[in-house]
Image (spheres, helix red, strand yellow):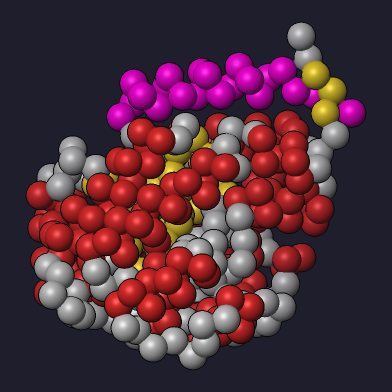
């Protein structure tokens, strides 16, 4: 029996959803940051929640990608212990489950959490322990993506790729390359991706966020990316856009953070609706829940308010997201059937 629905925040919050692009170190709880700082003797600019949030989160402000990334220095300062990583991974999955995200892919770079005594593999153990506990406690499945960093040496990316290989089938589902694109081309890190692809591991690469379509081209053709993180600049190259569309390469769209980083000037200029109307496999994601002061529900509400999307559009985006997940085909198929049956009961008022 079909249910007539009125789209509002509560309805979207209750929809079954997927978040494929979510950074652990950009998605902490403010109160947790303060507690971790006190426990580990980390000096923050303020221990008052509202003041600290103004330092860490972008609120009604356009900044560039480099300035946005610099905010991670604050969050990373409290993420240098095993317990901190385990706790924040658990809490991120809990927060996601509260808005009915059934599958969450968390990404982070182990090398950024070794300033004290932790080794890269210990950080992976910590994050996976937190995620696995959350899976037991909440209605959510998770996967972990290891990130190389563009402006850190390709040699480090290769070492991180080795970590991803070691943890394949143990919770790690993919490998990524993040960071500022300009002057740090993906092709410099291709040896890491050769190792990843040789081991049949999924890849997603941040590309076309703060640099042109050639960045996306490199991600696809030098590094073999299976998905593209952001891809805002893809619209500038029609031939590449059609390649992405024809090969059903998913785009991990993060509306709020794309505005914050200056990838687009405002929501009206975002190519998301163009991509969707053209038939690209687009997904909606949070990127950084804390730093961009958002939730996945908020991202869907932006699409509803500014692009006039209705439940039919959201059904397609949600199914796109499940199809694009770095999950085994059988498990993915089971989720899609379950979710599609639920979504098919909704019709717009």
Q: Is residue 45 above or below residue 58?
A: below
Q: Pick the residue in front: 9 or 77.
A: 77
The percent position of residue 288, horizontal first and vertical second, equals 51, 64
Query: Which residue is at a point 38% across and 41% down the rendered structure image?
Result: 134
Residue most toward the right? Answer: 349
User: Is 243 left, or right, of 272 in this rendering?
Assistant: left
Q: Check if residue 69 falls in the magenta segment.
A: no
Residue 40 occupies which quadrant of the picture? bottom left
Residue most toward the front? Answer: 39
Query: Which residue is at a point 39% across and 88% down the rendered structure image?
Result: 43
What range is drawn magenta here? Answer: 328-349
The percent position of residue 82, horizontal first and vertical second, equals 22, 63
Query: Which residue is at a point 60% across and 51% down the rendered structure image?
Result: 296
User: From where the camera sits, is residue 94 visible?
Assistant: yes
The percent position of residue 17, horizontal first and vertical second, equals 56, 38
Residue 114 occupies which quadrant of the picture? bottom left
Look at the image and tell me in which quarter the N terminus lies: top right
Q: Main secondary structure of the magenta part?
A: helix
Q: Check if residue 345 falls in the magenta segment.
A: yes
Query: Which residue is at a point 66% across and 35% down the rendered structure image?
Result: 14
User: From where the camera sits, is residue 203 visible?
Assistant: no
Q: Is residue 116 above or below residue 26?
A: below
Look at the image and tell me in which quarter the C terminus lies: top right
Q: Is residue 93 above or below residue 108?
A: above
Q: Pick the residue in front: 127 or 292.
A: 127
């Amino acid at each position: 029996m079909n249910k007539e629905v009125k789209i509002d925040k509560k309805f979207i919050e209750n929809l079954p959803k997927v978040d494929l692009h979510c950074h652990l170190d950009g998605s902490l709880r403010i109160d947790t940051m303060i507690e971790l700082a006190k426990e580990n003797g980390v000096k923050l600019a303020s221990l008052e929640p509202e003041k600290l949030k103004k330092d860490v989160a972008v609120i009604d402000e356009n900044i560039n990608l480099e300035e946005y990334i610099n905010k991670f220095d604050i969050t990373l300062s409290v993420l240098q212990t095993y317990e901190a990583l385990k706790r924040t991974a658990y809490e991120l999955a809990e927060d996601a489950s509260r808005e009915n995200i059934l599958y969450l892919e968390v990404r982070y770079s182990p090398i950024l959490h070794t300033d004290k005594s932790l080794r890269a593999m210990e950080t992976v153990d910590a994050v996976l322990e937190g995620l696995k506990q959350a899976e037991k406690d909440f209605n959510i499945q998770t996967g972990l993506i290891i990130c190389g960093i563009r402006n850190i040496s390709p040699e480090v990316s290769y070492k991180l790729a080795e970590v991803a290989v070691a943890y394949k089938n143990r919770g790690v589902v993919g490998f990524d390359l993040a960071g500022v694109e300009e002057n740090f081309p993906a092709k410099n890190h291709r040896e890491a991706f050769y190792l990843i692809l040789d081991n049949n591991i999924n890849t997603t690469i941040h590309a076309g966020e703060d640099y042109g379509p050639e960045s996306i081209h490199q991600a696809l053709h030098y590094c073999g990316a299976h998905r593209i993180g952001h891809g805002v600049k893809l619209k500038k190259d029609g031939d590449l856009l059609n390649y992405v569309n024809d090969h059903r390469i998913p785009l991990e769209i993060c509306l709020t953070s794309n505005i914050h980083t200056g990838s687009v000037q405002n929501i009206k200029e975002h190519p998301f609706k163009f991509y969707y109307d053209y038939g690209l496999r687009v997904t909606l994601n949070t990127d950084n829940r804390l730093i961009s002061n958002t939730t996945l529900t908020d991202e869907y509400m932006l699409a509803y308010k500014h692009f006039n999307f209705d439940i039919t559009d959201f059904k397609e985006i949600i199914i796109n997201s499940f199809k694009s997940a770095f999950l085994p085909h059988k498990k993915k198929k089971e989720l899609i059937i379950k979710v599609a049956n639920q979504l098919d009961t909704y019709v717009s008022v």
